[in-house]
Image: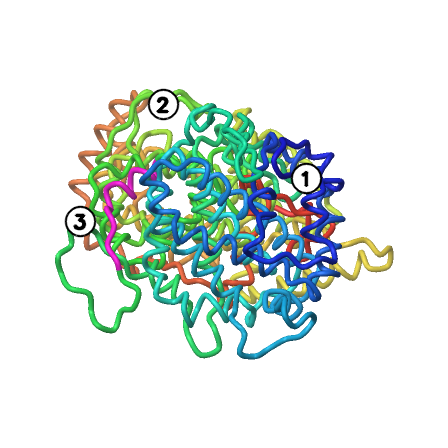
């Protein structure tokens, strides 16, 4: 570094870095700092090069750790940076490229050193390094200035106050990155930090007044998605040598640290995403998520979360209640547009979840939009490509749907939005379908994937809850959506009988049932025209009769018997025995969803009645099942009523004629004949201590997606490298 351009490999031998980290104290007024900060080298453009930079500067950082208590050079560097930032706004207005370039270089060095220090030492030791005084080597004075707090306040001012221009883009990104680095001590702890320097500085004291302004700026950085200036936009002509300084701003620095980095990562499976077009937006969003998920301090709530929970639309003229701290306003239309456009990334989906869950103003605005499809379709696409996404991204997308479906207005409106040619849905050509029917198809597909692959109870419970919330407002279901609701239910009804057969007659090896299941494709469609009614009548009637007497006890005895017969050989309990309760839960919920639709909107859904009649033989066998008897009453009544009308109409009816009879029958069926059940409504509630999930998740996103930041995977303690 210094007056000449450098290569990463030359950094350990650089004379200026040696002096910075050496045994000699350097005054903050020494010309050395101008020489140190007049460097340029091609910025790292990949995770490999970032790793090389990390390794090249290790010796410099370790030397500074040893010598700084005697020299106070870290403090002097920070004071140089702080003094320069006071003139930064004026320099931007005057287009003083050189001054801004050198100030950026100072911050770049501070960021690199801070990252190394945080990784190498405890927070107490880190604070001491920021309070060493040159005049009293190795001493600590309680009344000395707190440079760490001053640095953080300065970074907040830089992020919020410096105008975003071509010449300030680079230093704006670096300021955000340095704040992320300051908070990165969490990466090196397995447990969630509840008392740290971040709580000390960011939740009280001099930094606290900047809370709302910082959150607002970070949100606008995300909204605007400002691209970096084109390469060469900042290249300066070679300056004459004056005062012992050489200013050689090479093109490597012109493209600078905002170069689009390859987002490599050892950790969680990264979602496929387009090339990063706005490093500032990406970095700002990551910092915002980190701040929002800080744990509350012992004596104060997280002010950044408070700001996120309470901000309002710029068009909302109502006054803020005096009880709401850190309040501000932002353009909701711009925020909505950005959220719709950026859902390919985990962090944008997490921001959408955070706002929907925590900010009632944002949630009300989004639910009132008339272009809901712009928000919902990207979420459905995430769920549709579940195999390619990490599990956390899928969870967030699913919970967003669950939150949206808590609103009846949303559930009605999605059936009024007609979509054309959904190209990413490959199971079937959908030339025209409502948003509501597409949502049903994708959620059922997600449940199916989960039940056959990941077997995550949390996932399928939330999927079913979203369907249940919508069920009373199902309208004009697409024939394929209606078919999938019924066929998916039937798949589990058959599976249930099969598992019961195995439980009660573990050595019978019912080949007929086994053959039945072997002929079902992954999406539940039958490949062969099999009649299961004979099988069901053979087994189901006796099984259900037994169950109706002592249902739970018999099941328990059968399971224990099966487990006992296997224990002698130390063979684990088969999956089908373990799955019985899960299958029963899924069947129960699917029957309740069908019942809710029939009870509330029978006349709006002839395709669902058609699909139900097509599979009536299977449903009829479950009318006496003790677990489903109550919920089967309405379904059985509908099947009986419409079967009778079809029988009266004669044989060999066309599909069109059957649908016509169903529509006529829906009008004729007295509504009071259908038993009323409590409305199906599920509300998303975060589990206790949500930070145990969200903090590791957010930092895994930082680790994998942050621009220009690299951490050695072997040092990471918060999450495992092979986790989702």
Q: Which mark is residue 171?
A: none
The residue lying furthest to the right in this view is: 569
- Seen in the picture, residue 85 relative to 662 is either above or below; the reply is below
Task: Identify the residue at image location x=24%, y=39%.
Answer: 475
Q: Which mark is residue 53?
A: 1
Front residue of 338/221: it is 221
Q: Distance between the Cα atoms at labels 2 and 3?
A: 35 Å
For this view, does 372 lie left or right of residue 623?
Answer: left
Is residue 338 found inside the magenta-colored segment of the image?
yes
Q: Which mark is residue 430?
A: 2
Q: Position of residue 658 (x, y in %)?
A: 27, 27
Is residue 637 found inside the magenta-colored segment of the image?
no
Instruction: Give the mark toward the camera: 2 or 3.
Output: 2
Q: Position of residue 172 (x, y in %)?
A: 43, 44
Displayed quadrant of residue 663: top left
Instruction: Give the mark toward the camera: 3 or 1.
Output: 1
Magenta stretch in the rendered image: 328-340
Helix, strand or loop under label 3: loop
């Amino acid at each position: 570094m210094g007056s000449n351009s450098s290569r990463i490999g030359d950094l350990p031998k650089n004379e200026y870095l040696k002096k910075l980290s050496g045994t000699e104290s350097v005054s903050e007024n020494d010309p050395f700092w101008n020489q140190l900060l007049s460097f340029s080298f091609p910025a790292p453009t990949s995770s490999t090069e970032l790793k090389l930079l990390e390794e090249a500067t290790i010796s410099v950082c370790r030397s500074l750790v040893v010598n700084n208590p005697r020299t106070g050079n870290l403090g002097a560097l920070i004071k140089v940076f702080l003094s320069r930032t006071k003139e930064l706004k004026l320099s931007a207005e005057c287009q003083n490229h050189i001054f801004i370039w050198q100030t950026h270089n100072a911050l770049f060095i501070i960021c690199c050193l801070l990252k190394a220090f945080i990784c190498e030492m405890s927070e107490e030791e880190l604070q001491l390094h920021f309070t060493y005084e040159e005049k009293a080597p190795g001493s600590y004075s309680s009344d000395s200035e707190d440079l760490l707090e001053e640095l953080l306040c300065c970074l907040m001012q830089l992020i919020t106050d410096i105008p975003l221009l071509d010449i300030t883009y680079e230093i704006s990104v670096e300021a955000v990155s340095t704040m992320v680095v300051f908070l990165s001590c969490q990466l090196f702890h397995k447990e969630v930090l509840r008392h740290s320097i971040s709580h000390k500085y960011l939740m009280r004291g001099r930094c606290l007044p900047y809370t709302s302004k910082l959150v607002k700026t970070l949100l606008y950085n995300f909204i605007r998605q400002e691209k970096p200036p084109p390469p060469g936009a900042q290249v300066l002509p070679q300056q004459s040598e004056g005062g012992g300084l050489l200013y050689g701003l090479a093109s490597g620095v012109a493209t600078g640290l905002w170069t689009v980095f390859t987002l490599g990562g050892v950790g969680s499976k990264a979602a496929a995403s387009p090339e990063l077009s706005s490093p500032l937006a990406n970095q700002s969003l990551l910092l915002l998520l980190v701040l929002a998920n800080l744990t509350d301090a012992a004596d104060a709530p997280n002010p950044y979360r408070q700001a996120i929970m309470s901000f309002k639309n710029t068009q909302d003229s109502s006054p803020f209640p005096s009880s709401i701290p850190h309040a501000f306003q932002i353009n909701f239309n711009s925020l909505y547009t950005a959220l719709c456009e950026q859902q390919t990334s985990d962090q944008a989906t997490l921001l959408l979840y955070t706002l929907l869950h925590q900010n009632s103003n944002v949630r009300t605005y989004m639910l009132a939009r008339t272009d809901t499809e712009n928000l919902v379709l990207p979420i459905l696409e995430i769920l549709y490509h579940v195999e390619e996404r990490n599990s956390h991204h899928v969870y967030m997308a699913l919970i967003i749907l669950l939150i949206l479906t808590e609103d009846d207005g949303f559930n009605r409106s999605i059936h009024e939005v007609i979509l054309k040619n959904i190209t990413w849905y490959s199971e079937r050509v959908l030339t025209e379908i409502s948003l509501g029917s597409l949502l049903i198809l994708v959620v059922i597909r997600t449940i199916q994937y989960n039940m056959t692959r990941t077997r995550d109870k949390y996932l399928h419970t939330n999927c079913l809850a979203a369907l249940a919330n919508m069920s009373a407002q199902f309208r004009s279901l697409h024939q394929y959506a209606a078919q999938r609701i019924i066929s998916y239910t039937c798949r589990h009804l058959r599976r249930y009988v099969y598992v019961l057969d195995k439980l009660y007659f573990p050595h019978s090896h019912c080949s007929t049932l086994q053959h039945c299941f072997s002929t079902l494709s992954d999406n539940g469609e039958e490949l062969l025209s099999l009649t299961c009614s004979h099988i069901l009548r053979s087994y189901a009637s006796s099984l259900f009769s037994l169950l109706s007497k002592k249902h739970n006890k018999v099941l328990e005895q059968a399971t224990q018997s099966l487990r006992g017969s296997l224990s002698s050989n130390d063979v684990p309990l088969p999956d089908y025995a373990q799955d019985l309760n899960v299958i029963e839960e899924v069947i129960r919920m699917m029957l309740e969803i069908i019942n809710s639709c029939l009870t509330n909107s029978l006349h709006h859904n002839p395709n669902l009645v058609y699909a139900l009649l097509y599979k009536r033989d299977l449903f009829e066998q479950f009318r006496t099942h003790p677990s489903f008897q109550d919920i089967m009453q309405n379904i059985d009544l509908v099947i009986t009523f419409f079967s009778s009308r079809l029988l009266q109409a004669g044989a060999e009816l066309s599909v069109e004629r059957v649908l016509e009879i169903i529509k006529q029958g829906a009008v004729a069926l007295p509504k009071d004949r259908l038993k009323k059940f409590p409305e199906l409504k599920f509300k998303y509630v975060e589990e206790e201590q949500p930070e145990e999930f969200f903090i590791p998740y957010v930092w895994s996103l930082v680790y994998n997606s942050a621009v220009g930041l690299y951490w050695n995977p072997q040092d990471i303690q918060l999450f495992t490298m092979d986790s989702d």
